[in-house]
Amino acid sequence: MIAWLRRVDPAFYHKEPHLLRTQAQIARYTDEAQAELRLSVLAADRMLHAATTIVALSAYAAATGAGTLDPHRDWLTIWAFAVLAVAGPRALPWWPRADGGATWRHALIGSALIMIPALWTHVDSALLSLALLTGASLFVARGRGRVALLVLAVGVLFGVRMPAHPLFVAPLVGVFAAGASVLVVRVIARMWRLRPQVATWAAFATLLVTCAYTFAFEAPAVALRVPAEIAAIAVAYLGVCIMAGRIRRAELMARPNGVLSIPQSIVPLLDRSHHHAIICWFE
Amino acid sequence: MLPYLKLTIAPPISIAVLGASLVAATIAGVLHPALRALVVFVVAFPLLWIALATTLSYLTARALRAASVEVPSRTRAMGSFRLALTLAHGWRVFPAVGVLTNARFSTAGGAIDSGPWAEIPVVEVGRAARSSWDVQVKRRGTLLVGPFRAAVELPGSAIRATAVFDRTYSVTVLPAVYHLQPFVDALLAGRHAAVGRFQNLPAATEEYVGAREYRPGDSPKLIHRVLSLRTRDPKQFYVREFQDPSRDDLSLVLDTAPPLDGDAALHRYRLEKAICFVCALCRTFAARRLTVRFVCQRGARDVVTLRLRPLDADLDRLEMELAQLDLRGDRATLGRVLLGEVRRHGAAVIFVSLRPREQADQQRLPMVTLTPDHVPVFTREVVCQ
């Protein structure tokens, strides 16, 4: 009988394992899978990348007093902010994978960041040296070296404000900053899966901390150009709003449109395990 | 349909971080009077943005109404149906942007799962928008759909405002449809001898309906001599078949008593297969214009009997009954039911059993017993509708 069935309906015997596998268990769309999909949408969003860049550059302009910081006295601060403005956005999860010429571009952007605000104030050898230093450090830092560079920049920012030599304090502060960064990134990564808008609040908080740093340590320089500062911060805030809209758009786009699977153990598919079955009847 | 609102606040740690940043910026800036305008702008912008987004999220979610829900009253196991929710926006000031909707699914026993979120990009002011899902149901019985939820969270909002439409819709999930092997039709040629005839000779009221191949046990008096002589093989015989059009043709008894041996999951699996098989068998009988008396035990002292004429309405009644059937029978009642059906004059009895072997008392009864081993051989594949 079984041989006859196999002969008359061979297709089913090949199809049944497929039916059992696909119809009995349909994988649910998990939060992790949804976060990955959202991330891929964000990675392909050029407007988001542009907005992130604008936020970073505007924040740099606001933090350095729109070019009023003295490159002779505050060269470490300028270097640190330039490094953070260029390498920071590239460390974000939605930034696309760097290609071969990315390090050159980063170095040029870093150098230009320092040079352009000073074009109408003062251009001297110290400024050129600082631009070259920034470009070189951004060029050298690749892969995990970029993370180390970011940590070092944060360490320098707080190290120069301490009553000790920055070269000694910066590594110590950098280690603390790295620990805090790991903690924050973990918290954000965990919340990101469920509440993607937490990135918006994180961006607002970053800008506010940058402003607080500038108000606390560079108030005299910033006071010279308050309208320019307001304009730079307004551009940065608008960039954050655009980022928030793009993240929400990705959240809507990255919704699963699959079929709902109701978990259960009973699926009335055919069971061909009883191959010895015999048709019998009674008189 | 008016919803009630459920508010989900932003993660506390993000509120704390943003609050600390605001305080730090305020304290750092307030010490310098020259920076007062700058500090006000720096602190006020995020606060105003968050407040505006939060207010709009709340008000638009509150203004959402469920205009209509498209859900079928019945579907078939292993099949799929389209579920749709139409939302209307009653607030005439601001559109609802980025609305996420989903539905909850449950059975009478409890919640099963929440459906995937489906998005509506924009619900215009005073307009309606629709989101839909394809739902595949595997489990026979009653499926409860609802409540529906619509969540609004504008970028930067401190809350996610979810409008919950607290109404549940019931969907009866009928058994899956099996295709029977073509040879089942051959076995059912005529009615009695093929499926458990216990009368050796036709009664006076019966009339000739056809002929079929001889099987061991058939009465030699029924051999169709003319037809048998025409065959080339001298050992091949044909017998005549008779039918009484005035009575039920068949009694079909379904076993719902859980067997004593084996695990519960295996029993449930066998019951599902048996139910689908009975459903397919009754459709085959109806196609052959036979009237079937279907008997099964629904619960303690609750035996249901359906007379199924070859009508769609009767088959629908059967499927509705089968959709709610469970393993609630007992052996004593089943034995009494089988004895009663066998004693009914004229009708052949088919017993669809959940046990791999017949009991001793059932072996003595003149009926056909189909064990779980028979069902895979008789059936071909599941048909999704």
Image (spheres, coloured by chain):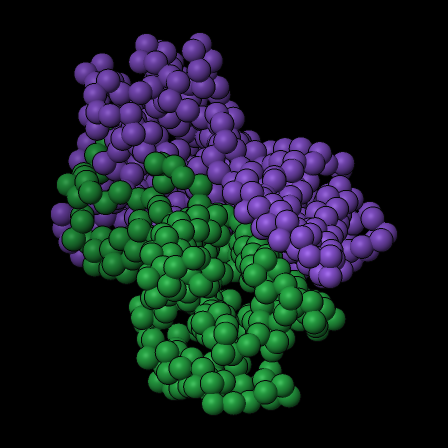
Residue at the image point whose x is 48% and y is 19% from the top: B304
Left or right: A177 with respect to A17? right
Left or right: A101 with respect to B39? left
Residue at the image point whose x is 58% and y is 68% from the top: A63
Asked if residue B374 is positioned above or below residue A86 in the image, the reply reads above
Asked if residue B132 is positioned above or below residue B66 in the image, the reply reads below
User: Is residue B68 in view?
Assistant: no
- Who is closer to the viewer here, B73 or A180? A180
- Who is closer to the viewer here, B157 or B207? B157
User: Is residue B353 in view?
Assistant: yes
Chain the render paints purple: B
Left or right: A18 with respect to B104? left
Residue at the image point whose x is 38% and y is 37% from the top: A264
Number of numbered markers: 0
Residue at the image point whose x is 54% and y is 86% from the top: A115
Left or right: B198 with respect to A254? left
- Who is closer to the viewer here, A69 or B174? A69
Q: Quadrant of residue B361?
A: top left
Residue A249 image point, x, y percent = 60, 62
Chain the render paints green: A
Which quadrant of the rendered structure holds the C terminus of chain A? top left
Residue B240 image point, x, y percent = 32, 39
Residue B273 image point, x, y percent = 34, 36
Residue B340 image point, x, y percent = 38, 14
Asked if residue B236 is positioned above or below residue A128 in the image, the reply reads above
